[in-house]
Amino acid sequence: PSRARAICIAREYSAVFATAHGWGRLPSIMRAENPNLQLWDERSLLYSCDGCADGVFSTTWIRRHHPDWIIHDTAGLEVHPVGRPDLTLLDFTNLDYQAAWVQRMVTLITHDGFTGVDVIDATNDQKWDGLPVADNSDVRDTELHGFIVRRQVAKALSLARSVLRDNGFLVAAENGPPRLVSPD
């Protein structure tokens, strides 16, 4: 939004979930207008992408620095959400990836002035173009489906929540369906 619109939003609302497109330094301006404003940055925990605003890491950077963080299916192919080949599934079961993601989030939301992060893709009902297999020092050669996905996403969110809270930030996760959402 424009600076004037951002100030109006800050005056009118107590919490704003901001898409990751074009906010720049507006969150700091908005929080100066309303110090009690909760302002959430929407970000992906599960995927990398090149040129999308909600990715924490670009796929190009991941391929260059951490190709082991890319999840492959049982046939050895990279995994993507159905119909979204531009998004690459990352190894959310890997503690090194989780730690890097949360540290990057602390840097991003601190820099931009947000009060928290809304994890937009932590759904319990994933639809991928292949059956992902995690194989790292934390999860050995495990097919990711059903309960295992839910448990591993919950563990990743728990780490994120702990570190972000320790740094004074909030975490929300859009992880329905509602019958599976914890009150936390």
Image (cartoon, helix red, strand yellow):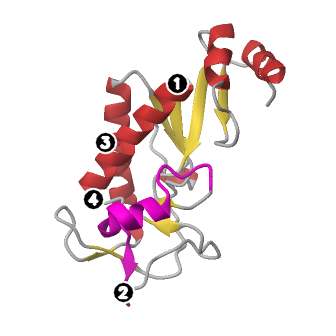
User: In the rendered structure, does residue 53 fall within the stretch colored magenta?
Assistant: yes
Query: Tags 1 and 2 in contact by the CB under 8 Å rule?
Result: no
Q: Which residue position is annotated with label 4?
A: 94
Question: Which quadrant would residue 84 be assigned to in this image?
Answer: bottom right
User: In the rendered structure, does residue 166 fall within the stretch colored magenta?
Assistant: no
CA gap, disc 4 to disc 2? Answer: 18 Å
Q: Residue drawn 50% across and 27% down?
A: 111
| First in residue order: circle 1 vs circle 4 | 4
Question: Please, which residue is most extreme toward the left here?
Answer: 137
| First in residue order: circle 3 vs circle 1 | 1
User: Which amino acid type corresponds to the residue marked 1 in the rendered image?
Assistant: Thr
Q: Which residue position is annotated with label 3?
A: 159
User: For numbered disc 4, what is the local secondary structure?
Assistant: loop
Q: Which residue position is annotated with label 1?
A: 115
- In the image, residue 60 lies at what x, y percent? 47, 64
Bounds of the magenta span? 52-76
